[in-house]
Every structure is written in structure tokens, then in C-alpha cells.
Image: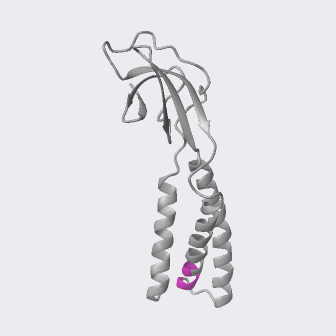
């Protein structure tokens, strides 16, 4: 394998790992719209704590819509070609493997991006002292309407 192919394979692998590392759900369960009572489990004198009253999902993600498919296709094509060339495949077999890898990689990359492109959320919190605040964040981290949270550094987290 020449150094250019090795370099391309490394870049493609890094891009795949970067996309796969982001493949987590937005962090809420099926009870998303159902408020859950706090039953007085709030610690006393928490100035930056409160109850989530509403959650809005904002439109739009961070990456263009077909980025996952394009990167996945590139990784799949390079991987398919390299695997075929190292297993003794002819030039024709290498090309077929590259095309098959590109299709498979594009499908996988698109699926990964669809899972990660959850967007952003506005979390409305009624603070214990009566104030109301709204924070915008990329994931909910288990927060649902009715959750008791702490608002710190512009982010709500479950208490």
C-alpha cells in the first residue's frame, strides 16, 4: 500500500470515528411531553434550581444534510478498494468493492447523521424563587418537562 492510500485511509477512518462518536440520541425518553412531579425532593436554598415547565426543539442541525452520506461513501469506497486489493482481487474486483463500499458507507453515514442531528433545545425553567429562565442547549441529558434541574453556566442539568 503506498503512502497516499494509507494517508487517505487514515483520514477516512478519523472522519468515520468522529461521526460515530457523536451518534447519541437527544437523551429523552418516551415520556417527553408528560410532566413528572418533583414530590418535594428539592434541596432547600438552591438559588439556581427549578422545575422544567416546557421544552422546545429548535429547527436545524449543525451539519449540511448530506454530510454523513458523503463522508460515509468516501470511507466505504477507500475501505472496499483497500480490502479487495489486499485479498488479491483483480482491478475489476477492486472497483466493484469500492462501489459497494461507497454505497454501504453512504447508507451508514446518513443513518449516523440522522441520529446525531437532533438540533437544539430551549428549556424553560421556573426557578424556586419564582423567576423564569430559558436556556438553549444541544442535548437534554435526561431532562423532561417536570424535571427538577440546576441552571449553571447557561445549561440545565438534572439535579
Which residue is farthest top? 40
In the displayed structure image, the side of residue 91 where residue 142 appears, left or right: left
Quadrant of the image occupied by residue 80? bottom right
Magenta region: which residues?
82-86
In terms of depth relative to the viewer, which is nearer, 108 or 50? 50
**How far from the left and from the top, in percent, is residue 132?**
48, 21
What residue do we see at 51% from left, 13% from top?
A: 37
What residue do we see at 51% from left, 64% from top?
A: 16
Is 11 located above or below residue 131 in the figure?
below
**How far from the left and from the top, in percent, is residue 19?**
52, 58
Quick check: is 85 in the magenta stretch? yes
What residue do we see at 50% from left, 42% from top?
A: 138
Is 134 located above or below residue 146 in the figure?
below
What residue do we see at 63% from left, 84% from top?
A: 94
Which residue is farthest left? 45
**How far from the left and from the top, in percent, is residue 20?**
51, 56
In terms of depth relative to the viewer, which is nearer, 49 or 92? 49
Amino acid at each position: 500500500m503506498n503512502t497516499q492510500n494509507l494517508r487517505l485511509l487514515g483520514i477516512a477512518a478519523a472522519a468515520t470515528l468522529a461521526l460515530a462518536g457523536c451518534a447519541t440520541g437527544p437523551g429523552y425518553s418516551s415520556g417527553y411531553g408528560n410532566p413528572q412531579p418533583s414530590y418535594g425532593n428539592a434541596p432547600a436554598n438552591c438559588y439556581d434550581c427549578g422545575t422544567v415547565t416546557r421544552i422546545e426543539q429548535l429547527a436545524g442541525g449543525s451539519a449540511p444534510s448530506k454530510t454523513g452520506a458523503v463522508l460515509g461513501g468516501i470511507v466505504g469506497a477507500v475501505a472496499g478498494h483497500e480490502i479487495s486489493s489486499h485479498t488479491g482481487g483483480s482491478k475489476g474486483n477492486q472497483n466493484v468493492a469500492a462501489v459497494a463500499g461507497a454505497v454501504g458507507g453512504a447508507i451508514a453515514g446518513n443513518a449516523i447523521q440522522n441520529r446525531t442531528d437532533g438540533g437544539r433545545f430551549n428549556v424553560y425553567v421556573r426557578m424556586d424563587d419564582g423567576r423564569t429562565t430559558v436556556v438553549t442547549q444541544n442535548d437534554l441529558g435526561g431532562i423532561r418537562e417536570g424535571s427538577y434541574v440546576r441552571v449553571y453556566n447557561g445549561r440545565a442539568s438534572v439535579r
